[in-house]
Image: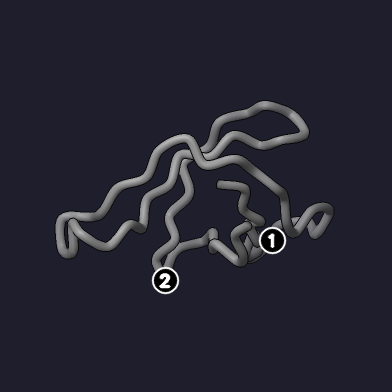
Amino acid sequence: MTVIIQHYLQVGERRDKDWWMGQVIHFGGAAREPKIPNLFQIADVNSGVIRWVNADPDGCLGLLARG
C-alpha cells in the first residue's frame, strides 16, 4: 500500500518538507486497541529510509491518504 504522510511541525522546527510518500511494510495496533492499526513501518519511496509512523490523532505524524 502506498501512502502519503503529513508531518505536523513541532515548535521551533523548520518547514522545509511537510509531507512524503511511502510504502507500508508492516502495521499493528496499540495496547489499547490492538485490532485498530495505528503504528506503521513505512519506507520512504524517495530515500529508502524506513520510519515508524504513529497514526494516532495525537501523534506527530499522520496518515493522510492511501492508494
Residue 44: x and y in percent read 66, 37
The 10 Å Cα crowd at callout 1, few under 14, some 14 to 19, many 20 or more, is few
For the view shown, which residue lies furthest in the top direction?
48
**Residue 63: image location, x then y, percent:** 55, 62
Q: Of residues 11 and 41, which is closer to you in this image?
A: 41
- The residue lying toward the viewer, choosing from 18 and 25, is 25
Relative to 31, say whether 9 is above or below: below
Q: Please tell me which residue lies in front, 11 or 9.
A: 9
The residue lying at 53 percent from left, 37 percent from top is 51
Which one is earlier in the sequence, the residue at label 1 or at label 2? 1
Give the side of residue 38 with respect to residue 25, left or right.
left
Q: Going 18% across and 64% down the picture, which residue do you hit?
A: 33
Three-letter code for the amino acid on which mark 2 is drawn: Asp
Question: Measuring 59% from the left and 60% from the top, which residue is drawn there?
Answer: 66
Instruction: Report which residue position mark 2 lands on.
Output: 58
Q: Tell which tag, 1 or 2, sits nearer the viewer.
A: 2
Q: Position of residue 15 (x, y in %)?
A: 80, 59
Q: Label 1: which residue?
A: 12
Q: Quarter holding the C terminus?
A: bottom right
Q: Does the CB distance between marks 1 and 2 fall below 8 Å?
A: no
Q: Position of residue 4 (x, y in %)?
A: 66, 56
Crowd band around label 2 with a 10 angstrom C-alpha radius: few (<14), some (14–19), many (20+): few
